[in-house]
Amino acid sequence: MYVCICHAVTEVELRDCIGEGARTVEEIGDVCGAGTSCGTCLDRVDVLLTAELAPSVMSDLPLSA
């Protein structure tokens, strides 16, 4: 599933960025471009980032509203 359509970033690619050390939305944008154009994906990027960094707290939340 695409998280960022503007830069064709998938959920898998986003998880890889986080796994390689990205810890903020800005760092993710620097690595793969997600969230740096129209901004529509910023909420999903933030939720996925939070879920990956704190899975015990966030794992039950949906990725989209």
Image: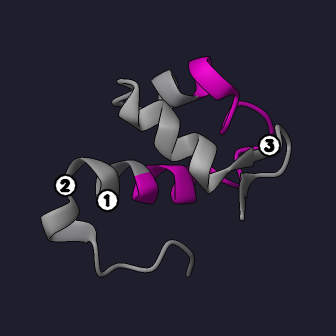
Does the residue at mark 2 contact the one at mark 3 (Cβ under 8 Å)? Answer: no
Q: Position of residue 18 (x, y in %)?
A: 41, 36
Q: Secondary structure at mark 3?
A: loop
Q: Which residues are magenta?
A: 29-48
Left or right: residue 31 versus residue 54 is: right
Q: Earlier in the sequence, mark 1 or mark 3?
A: 3
Seen from the viewer's position, the closer of residues 15 and 44 is 15
Q: Secondary structure at mark 1?
A: helix
Q: Residue at x 82, y 37 (%)?
A: 7
**Residue 26 lies in the magenta stretch:** no
**Residue 41 lies in the magenta stretch:** yes
The answer to whether 22 is drawn above or below residue 49 in the figure is above
Q: Earlier in the sequence, mark 2 or mark 3?
A: 3
Q: Residue at x 44, y 50 (%)?
A: 46
Does the residue at mark 2 contact the one at mark 1 (Cβ under 8 Å)? Answer: yes
* Callout in the foreground (2, 3): 2
Q: Position of residue 63 (x, y in %)?
A: 50, 72
User: Where is mark 3, residue-wise?
Assistant: 38
Q: Which numbered disc covers residue 51?
A: 1
Which amino acid type is shown beneath numbered disc 1? Answer: Ala
